[in-house]
Image (tube, rainbow, N blue to C red):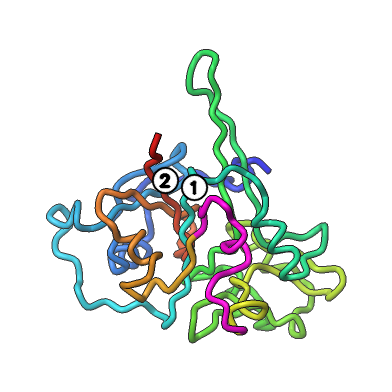
Amino acid sequence: MNINELEKLTNEGVDNLPTLERRTFLRAGLAITGLFMGGTVLSLTSVRDVEAAVSSMPKDEKYPYKPHYSMVMRQNLCVDCERCMDACVRTNHVPPYGWRTKILERTRNVGPKEKETIFMPVLCNQCNEPPCVRVCPTVATYKDKTNGIVMMESKKCIGCKTCMAACPYNARYFNEETRAVDKCNFCWDTRLTKGMKDTACVEACPAKVRIFGDLSDPNSEVYKLVHQPETTVWVLRPEVGALPNVFYMNVTLDI
């Protein structure tokens, strides 16, 4: 699937970013610095680099959940091997027509005769302000109050597909067998509740693209990656104000 299919809306600019979203990013220890990938993805960087320019950041802000599950995608490490997708299908019994995670692809010209292919792993962003939850008429989809994962309770789903239309990331599908909408839940029922610390896609990735953990824990790898100095971190489609908990970054490759 092409990245352009995901990026349907153009970013109107940093100045038009909703105040709530801007404030929440600052509370997370991040500061807005610019745009990425043609203006549709917001880039963020550690506040330590720009704190003087945007005034002092709060030191005692807490994340909404404990644990506050999050995932960091080290995007430029992805080689599109699709092992993450295969592991997800096996672990979560995803039918052939459905998906919980996939890899988008875009090819761009970087020279007169040279092209570059970019791979971007995507999944449910477990948003802090999920549009899917707001529109569900039966509360079949909801935000877990303890860990922040956006869950689906299939028995309550009436198959109206309103949540599918509302999702900014096209991260839901209708399961014909269960007659309910399904999506990624960070392997909550299949792995996390059974004592496993990583999702199936994280464990399967040979390139260590995906890092999963508790964003509220300063000792976790996800926290350290998102907050490390001199590193730009971005989220997908920030203009919708969903406040994702899936972050993207590129890492320096040793040649």
Q: Judge from the rendering whether residue 148 lies leftward or rightward of residue 24; answer left or right.
A: right
Percent of width and height locating residue 46: 27, 56
Percent of width and height locating residue 120: 56, 47
**Where are the magenta residues, as a range?**
194-210
Q: Is residue 105 above or below residue 245?
A: above
Percent of width and height locating residue 213: 46, 70
Q: Is residue 133 above or below residue 4?
A: below
Q: Residue at x 78, y 66 (%)?
A: 174
Q: What count of labels does the image hold?
A: 2
Crowding around mark 1 (Cα neighbors within 10 Å: few <14, some 14 to 19, many 20+) is: some
Judging by the rendered image, the residue that carries numbered circle 1 is 75
Residue placed most toward the observer, 102 or 40: 102
Q: Residue at x 30, y 52 (%)?
A: 45
Task: Please check the rendered image and state whether residue 138 is part of the magenta-colored stretch, yes or no.
Answer: no
Residue placed most toward the observer, 130 or 120: 120
Judging by the rendered image, the residue that carries numbered circle 2 is 250
Q: Secondary structure at mark 2?
A: loop
Quarter of the picture containing the N terminus is top right
Q: Residue at x 34, y 52 (%)?
A: 44
Label located before the other in sequence (2 or 1) = 1
Task: Please check the rendered image and state whether residue 209 is part of the magenta-colored stretch, yes or no.
Answer: yes
